[in-house]
Image (tube, helix red, strand yellow):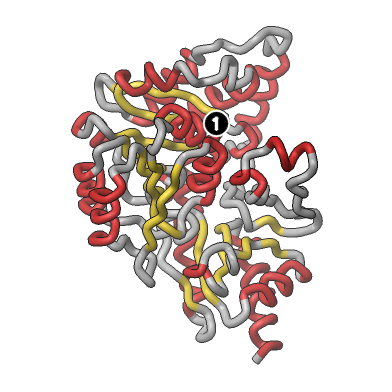
Amino acid sequence: MSPIPASSPAGALLRQEILDLHAYHVPDSTGCIKLDAMENPYSVPPALRGEIAEAVASAAINRYPDPGAASLKEKIRGVTGLPQGMDVLLGNGSDELIQLLAMALNKPGATLLGVEPSFVMYKMIAAFTGMRYVGVPLEADFSLDMPATLAAIRRERPALVFLAYPNNPTGNLFPADAVTRIIEASPGLVVVDEAYYAFAGDSFVPRLAHYPNLLVMRTFSKLGMAGLRLGFLAGSTAWLEQLEKLRLPYNVGVLPQLVAEKLLAHHGVLLQQAQQIKLDRAKLQHRLNEIATVRVYPSEANFMLFRVADATAVFNGLKRRGVLVKNLDGGHPMLKDCLRVTVGTPDENERFMAALQEIIIQSA
């Protein structure tokens, strides 16, 4: 994309931080096994598909959706097991919620703090909203650098802290006691982003009532609903009532509300699929560990980060063989020569492994 000249109308009117940004890139996956976006590879079971189709056929799409999505929220409370006194706020995926939080807390001089590398939208949305961003580097093994993180909190006094739990793109789950220390040390709001909760061994939802500055954010995209674009914040009504003022009207449409309700009524089916993904993750990690020239990092998400000798060459080789993964090389200095692969079906994982082994053998 060509830079916009400062002398052009757009260059004269747009904020410099927007001109400096690159749009979030989604590559064309035509003809490829899609293992780049952490989606659930399993479709909805046929019986449930029929139930959804029947409900959609009679949906009142000529009417605006329920603005408060009361019925869907009740389903979410039920499957999440929210502590008493906690509530939820819905968003168009988690991205909208991140933006809403940044808008709400962006007083003059306010800081958004995160760790790096982590979910790129924290930093991007800080730029969108004109909020100051501070990133604290992780350790070389992608664990939390607690002295540096706590020092940054004392120094920066952030209004907003994001922690992905498990972290994306590294896949590791930070120790719960370390996250608790960050919550307790923070003068502002701490959002624990549990996008991959279904594949992890812990959650901060049960701890919501213990920390008045804690919110938990989740998306259903990784659980089989990526096409619905549905996320939610969970926390005290004291926070959510204020954030609700910034939520755009009707941000979750009639069909996403209806379909999500049907799927959450069969939450157990989705969790069974997540359990299968966890089993396949362990097998895929074992296979990757058998390749001497590949370093694979532990994961409690539905993807794995791995490092190879020349990530871009391997990425291109995989794509030529019909397998699309995420090339993270160049995205952050700590991700040099790193690729991220989503755990697919057993057949997809086998095709990925066969293609990767062929590339490595040819490059040896």
SS at mark 1 in the image:
loop
Depth check, front residue: 192 or 278: 192
Which residue is identified by label 1? 230
- Residue lying furthest bottom: 364
- Kindly tell me whether residue 266 is visible in this rendering: no
Coordinates of residue 289 in the picture (x, y in percent): 47, 77
Please determine whether, in this image, residue 234 is positioned above or below residue 145: above
Instruction: Look at 50% across and 48% down and name the residue there.
Output: 123
Instruction: Look at 62% across and 79% down and name the residue there.
Output: 310
Please determine whether, in this image, residue 131 is positioned above or below residue 239: below
Please determine whether, in this image, residue 344 is positioned above or below residue 272: below
- Kindly tell me whether residue 244 is visible in this rendering: yes
Number of on-image labels: 1
Looking at numbered disc 1 in the image, what kind of residue is underneath it?
Leu
Crowdedness near tag 1: few (<14), some (14–19) or many (≥20) residues, C-alpha within 10 Å: many
Q: Where the C terminus falls, by quadrant? A: bottom right
**Which quarter of the figure has residue 253?**
top right
Instruction: Look at 58% across and 82% down and name the residue there.
Output: 309
Q: In the visual, does 186 lie left or right of 33?
A: left
Q: In the visual, does 241 lie left or right of 39?
A: left
